[in-house]
Amino acid sequence: MSQLVDKPLIMANNMTDTIIKPDMTTPNHTEKSNAEPNGNTAGQSWFNRPIPGIKQQLTAPLTAVETEPSTKCSNCHSMITNTALIFNCYVCPHCDHHLPMSARERLNWLLDQVEGELGQQFTAKDPLRFVDSKPYPQRMIEAQDKTGESEALIVLYGKLRNLDVVTCAFDFRFMGGSMGSVVGDRFVQAAEKALADKVPLVCFAASGGARMQEGLLSLMQMARTAAAIERLRIAGVPYIVVLTNPVYGGVTASLAMLGDIHLAEPKAMIGFAGKRVIEQTVRETLEEPFQRAEFLLEHGVVDEVVHRHQMIDTIYRLLAKLSCMPNVDA
Ligand SMILES: [Zn+2]
């Protein structure tokens, strides 16, 4: 069907070169070509004129994808309406590719009831007065305008079915989900809330690593978050990490790899340094699926690769088991 509709359009475009040029130089030809089979030439542009010898196609009614706001799958390049995408948890219905979710969407999707948000009082400082191609405060303002969030980590607490839980998620759109001092502050506050209430902590990681604009302050967050997780471990409070695409750098080297259980989304890229840097260091070519979630599962870094459609159920069953709730199969 699409071939039948496209073909005349392509031919019509090709005709612009072949018809217009003679029209400009030969007035007689113009008059002749303006004549319609039924004699009606008034008010009809050259583009809509029937082309002799070519059967006209009726214009097909617009499909939902053409009329509704849509998103292109980055894997199979199919257009999917945003409504269909939300209903399918941002998983492509054509190729099963897991598209990115914003942090707030992800936490609202996970929690059945949101009771509050933590860490909104923290704001980033610019002690180094860092400028690369742009000043750091300008980058922050642009990221805030783009995402509608004040920082790269969102912390919400509430109920997952009948379980109280504290959850946090990185927003990769916010300066690559980089971990600055505010991200560290928010994560530590989430861990302290989980510790005080003796409820599990769940973190969805998606980050490029530490935020270079804050220099040493961002690197300090690795130690701070690791210390907060250690306090959870000593108190026996469960901490589950879900590795989403991508997780790299200082976040991998701290809070994302210190969970009691590490889940990962299919084909998520997870590592410390990027593939190219490692190839240059070890002087070997690293083939797919290097640094993919499935590769890390084979090598014992990840405990389970979970499809997004089963993610909520899996997290709930694991938390219920770790919280020693009866009548739950893990
Ligand atoms: Zn797709």
Image: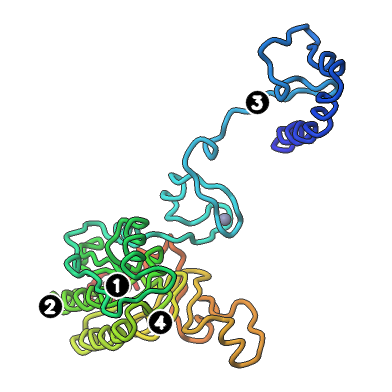
Position of residue 109 relative to residue 256, above or below, is: above
Q: Which residue is mark 4?
A: 252
Q: Residue at x 86, y 18 (%)?
A: 29
N-term mark: 4 or 1: 1
Where residue 229 sits: x, y (%)? Answer: 26, 84
Q: Which residue is mark 1?
A: 202
Q: Quadrant of residue 250?
A: bottom left
Label at residue 290? none
Q: Is mark 4 in CB contact (under 8 Å) with mark 3?
A: no
Q: Residue at x 18, y 86 (%)?
A: 235
Direction front: furthest residue = 25
Direction left: furthest residue = 196
- The kind of secondary structure element at disc 1 is strand
- Distance between the alpha carbons at the discs numbered 2 and 3: 64 Å
- Could you tell me the amino acid type at mark 4? Thr
Q: Residue at x 35, y 85 (%)?
A: 254
Q: Is mark 1 in CB contact (under 8 Å) with mark 2?
A: no
Q: Nearer the viewer, residue 187 or 141?
A: 141
N-term mark: 4 or 2: 2
Q: Which residue is mark 3?
A: 59
Where residue 105 sits: x, y (%)? Answer: 34, 57
- Could you tell me the amino acid type at mark 1? Val
In the rendered image, the quadrant that contains the N terminus is: top right
N-term mark: 1 or 2: 2
- Distance between the alpha carbons at the discs numbered 4 and 1: 15 Å
Direction bottom: furthest residue = 282
> Do we see residue 241 in this rendering?
no
